[in-house]
Amino acid sequence: KTVVHITGARPNFPKAAPVLAALDQKVDQMLVHTGQHYDDRLSRVFFDELALPEPDLNLNAGSGSHATQTAAVMVGLEQVFTERRPDLVVVYGDINSTLAAALVAAKLGIPVAHVEAGLRSFDMTMPEEVNRRVTDQLSDLLLVTSADAVGHLAREGVAAERIHFVGNPMIDTLLTHLDRFDEAAARKQHGLDGDYLVATLHRPSNVDDPAAVRQLVSVLHEAAERMPLVIPLHPRGRAGLEKAGLDASSGVKLTDPLPYTAFLGLVRGARAVLTDSGGVQEEASVLGVPCLTMRPNTERPVTITHGTNRLVTPHGVLPALDAVLAEPPATRPAPLEKRPPLWDGAAGPRIAEVILSWLAR
Ligand code: UD1
């Protein structure tokens, strides 16, 4: 049996690594990189650090409008799937490459497994919400990270036998590499001695609209007056943020995108993290680091109910931050019983088991 895994952007790599490892030697595997992310700092370093196998193929789809990017991935994958005729295509998360792969496979009659199915922000202005909904409709196996996702899929008419609550493979990767998240090294790298904060920002809703980005930049500068604030900048929106006045003044420390372990070492030692990323909400929750999510909604509510996350408006960031700073620090990392159910480091093997028994059916 042949299983083809589709990855394309930074958040895919820590999700795919434990699945590839758990299926190793049990099926023929092919790893495709669509090339959606092509910067070494968003791609190459993850393959090296996570010991991911070299992709069998890179489609070099690159950047562009949504249609251009999605179409480039589709055209490339149609050829691959037609030639290889895999028994299963595994897609990860909610990026354009995920949607493109699911669409091509479905049209060719090739079954699709979606890792991280069923998450919903109920915000159709997010490109990822469109990608999630369509991908789930096209998938044969829906591998779910949290119980709320099961309910969403059931309400959308997905048959119960297709849905498998397996836990979170991204957390497998986090727990595997936990000992390498070196807070002291992060302090040294960024010239930090006492308490500090970390922020990441890349969502179109936050970095593309000039008024929104100006407001957030002034909030970030105010936050940095409490204590130093390190901001690793995603290439998307970097120019917009700098144009809106984000600079390395009064406690703000700007850096390039960081490798996986360096970033999580930095987060692990932070008093709090401010973000609009999906993955960071999950990682901060398991590390036990307070997380303020600068968004009106989250597709990961389990990080609020079973984690350290809270949603904040631009006006709410500083009051929420002050509240967090006044609280006694939580245990780090969060003990197993305080984490979301099945975020235990064994999602990869559970996913492999579901896939293998499905292939043998
Ligand atoms: C993509 C995902 C997003 C995810 C994010 C993680 C979609 C719709 N979005 O967003 O869900 O949270 O990855 O990082 O799939 N760029 C570079 N170098 C690269 C890649 C991109 O400089 O290697 C810049 C380009 O200016 C590009 C822009 O970032 O136009 C956007 O890239 P794109 O892949 O479309 O989306 P991301 O914002 O990275």
Image (tube, rainbow, N blue to C red):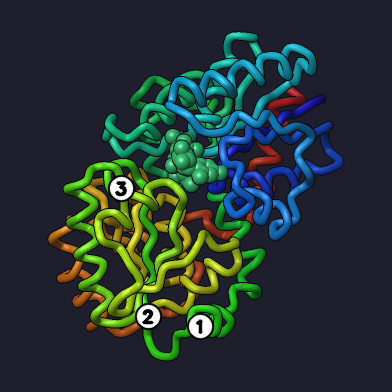
Task: Find the residue positioned furthest to the front.
Answer: 243
The image shows residue 218, relative to residue 132, as above or below, that is below
Judging depth in this view, the residue of 50 and 342 nearest the camera is: 50
Determine crowd level at label 2: few under 14, some 14-19, many 20+ residues with C-alpha closer than 10 A. Answer: many
Residue at the image position 35 percent from the left and 58 percent from the top: 275
Whether tag 1 and tag 3 are in contact, CB under 8 A, the answer is: no
Q: Which mark is residue 187?
A: 1
Residue at the image position 60 percent from the left and 29 percent from the top: 61
Judging depth in this view, the residue of 108 and 172 nearest the camera is: 108
Determine crowd level at label 3: few under 14, some 14-19, many 20+ residues with C-alpha closer than 10 A. Answer: many
Q: Secondary structure at mark 3?
A: helix
Residue at the image position 51 percent from the left and 33 percent from the top: 63
Residue 24, located in which quarter of the rendered image?
top right
Q: Amino acid at mark 2?
A: Tyr
Which residue has dot 3 on it? 207
Residue 273, located in which quarter of the rendered image?
bottom left
Whether tag 1 and tag 2 are in contact, CB under 8 A, the answer is: yes
User: Where is residue 1 shown, x and y percent of the image?
Assistant: 82, 25
Q: Secondary structure at mark 2?
A: loop
Task: Find the residue positioned furthest to the bottom.
Answer: 193
- The residues bearing labels 1 and 3 have C-alpha atoms spaced at a distance of 27 Å
The reply to whether residue 209 is in sight is yes
Judging depth in this view, the residue of 344 and 199 nearest the camera is: 199
User: Where is residue 66 shown, x and y percent of the image?
Assistant: 43, 26
Q: Amino acid at mark 3?
A: Val
Q: Amino acid at mark 1?
A: Arg
Of the two numbered discs 2 and 3 on the same chain, state the one appearing first in sequence: 2
Of the two numbered discs 1 and 2 on the same chain, state the one appearing first in sequence: 1
- The residues bearing labels 2 and 3 have C-alpha atoms spaced at a distance of 23 Å
Q: Which mark is residue 196?
A: 2
User: Where is residue 227 shown, x and y percent of the image?
Assistant: 30, 82
